[in-house]
Image (tube, grey):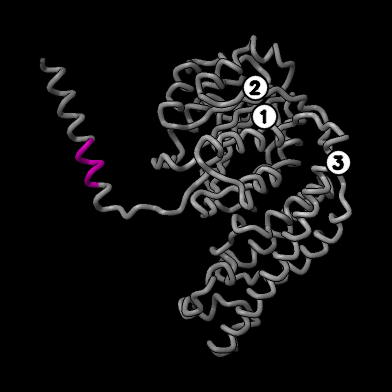
Amino acid sequence: MKKLALLIVAIGLFINSNVSQNANTPPDSKRKIQLAILFDTSNSMDGLLDQAKSRIWNIVNTIAKLEYDNEQPQIEIALYEYGNDDLAQKDGFVRQVSSFSTDLDDISSLLFGLTTNGGSEFCGTVIEKSITDLKWSQDTRDMKLIYIAGNEPFNQGVKDYKEVCKLAAVQDIFVSTIYCGDYQKGIQEFWKDGADLGTGKYFNIDSNKKIQYIKTPYDDSIQKLNEALNKTYIGYGVKGERKKEQQESEDMNAVSVAEENMVERVMSKSSNVYSNSSWDIVDYVKEDYDKLKSIPKKDLPEEMKSNSLEENIEFVKQKKNERERIQNNIQALAKKRGEYIQEQSKTNEVEDDFGKAISGSILKFANEKNYTKIGG
């Protein structure tokens, strides 16, 4: 009886705290798609990281095409690495590379900074940490996704992957697994079981294969538009100069993988999910030009410091209009590019890779959660 009474009290406190929180917290109308990617960074996973670097912008573009009740969701991406000897043993050889972030340049930079080293791969541990460490949405309309990629038995380590994956499912988080190796071996090593328990999808890929791109007649034009697009960004504050440099660095990282990968990045930069209000004046102001008053003169870029408020408003308006024009041109070319790739894909079969596995399954999850693709 005593245990039952304590349980009733605990449930009552939980309900009261939720009611109180809901009463005091205004509802967040902005839908979210939260994506946590967990990378095995042991010695054999260089190919996996290469595929991830080659496909990160394709994944972003897939999400950018989704909407919920005619509203584009906010994308938040988190990164973890596991199975690397350089990581702390006390943490189960797991490291949170990034918590949920909307800063896509930061995510790109951190992804390109990952390196491999031998180690012990504890899938249950890294999944549990991603569930407990990250600030997952409590709104059932939001899409919450975990993707774990690796090539060692899924049941290693002290954390029971069965219980961890069930915990994710209870919290409406889809856990999908990407086995880097033979399909049947992945099943034997419990990767499919993990996905089944986590209500996600199971994939296998050859992580050592180079990404197969389809070059299109529109790629060069999209890349040239990127040069003009970058000129519309106006850095402000302590982060302005550094983030502007980072933007250009991530352009170089993307093109270092492949020209087509750079094109995918430019397409992402033309979408609403690429937002930089923390350092770019145009994104910070949007339509509310009175916000310019809140930026101290010392935090303005040199070309704006000696101007009047009215002159600065006009300057930002011009940059905003120019950016929208360029983005619209990129999107028009991107549409033609997509149609060209779709047509070519009918006769040129492209094997699954890290990005295709994630992008394809996101669309399936989106359908289950009542998201739709922009334009049908």
* Helix, strand or loop at mark 2: loop
**Which of the pair 123/268 is nearer the observer?**
268
Alpha carbon distance from label 2 to label 1: 8 Å
Do callouts 2 and 1 mark residues in contact (Cβ within 8 Å)? Answer: yes
- The answer to which image quadrant residue 219 occupies is bottom right
The kind of residue tagged 1 is Thr
User: Compared with residue 62, is residue 244 higher up or lower down, i.e. above or below?
Assistant: below
The kind of residue tagged 2 is Gly
* Helix, strand or loop at mark 3: helix
- Residue for badge 3: 344
- Residue for badge 1: 41
Q: Residues within 10 Å of mark 3 (few under 14, many from 20)?
A: some
Q: Which mark is residue 25?
A: none
Q: Which mark is residue 119?
A: 2
Residue 10 locus on image (x, y percent) = 19, 29
Q: Is residue 176 left or right of residue 262?
A: left
Residue 161 locus on image (x, y percent) = 50, 18
Ranked by sequence position, the earlier of labels 2 and 1 is 1
